[in-house]
Image (cartoon, rainbow, N blue to C red):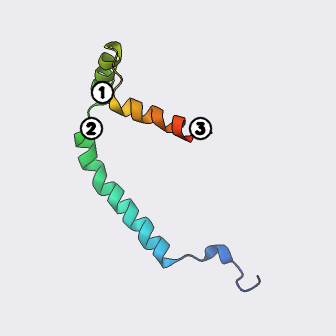
């Protein structure tokens, strides 16, 4: 509106605080989650074993539920 020469240079301090806190939280959770989760190869073998036995794992069913509920 003509008040600032470069309005895109402005930022809100609360955005900076929230973004920094989110980054810190993500960084702090990465280590424990990496130790909890299985190695991708072992996870793939486990899922394939369950699928060949005729039972889909809960995570697969949960992921499949999302497009079904979003679909219009």
Assess disc 1: are there few (<14), some (14-19) or many (≥20) residues with their C-alpha within 10 Å of its C-alpha: few
Residue occupying image coordinates x 36% and y 33%? 59
Residue 61 found in image quarter: top left
Q: Mark 2 falls on what kind of element?
A: loop
Assess disc 2: are there few (<14), some (14-19) or many (≥20) residues with their C-alpha within 10 Å of its C-alpha: few
Quick one: 2 or 63, which is closer to the camera? 63
Marks 1/2 in contact by CB < 8 Å: the verdict is yes
Q: Mark 3 falls on what kind of element?
A: loop
* On screen, residue 14 above or below 22: below
* On screen, residue 7 above or below 52: below
Q: Where does the N terminus fall, quadrant-wise?
A: bottom right
Q: Where does the C terminus fall, quadrant-wise?
A: top right
Q: Position of residue 16 (x, y in %)?
A: 46, 72
Residue occupying image coordinates x 27% and y 42%? 34
| Residue at the extreme top | 52
To which residue does mark 3 refer? Answer: 71
To which residue does mark 1 refer? Answer: 43
* Distance between the alpha carbons at the discs numbered 1 and 3: 29 Å
To which residue does mark 2 refer? Answer: 37
Assess disc 3: are there few (<14), some (14-19) or many (≥20) residues with their C-alpha within 10 Å of its C-alpha: few
């Amino acid at each position: 509106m003509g008040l600032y020469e470069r309005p895109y240079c402005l930022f809100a301090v609360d955005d900076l605080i929230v973004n920094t806190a989110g980054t810190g939280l993500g960084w702090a959770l990465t280590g424990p989650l990496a130790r909890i989760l299985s190695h991708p190869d072992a996870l793939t073998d486990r899922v394939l074993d369950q699928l060949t036995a005729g039972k889909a794992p809960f995570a697969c069913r949960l992921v499949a539920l999302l497009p079904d509920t979003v679909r219009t």
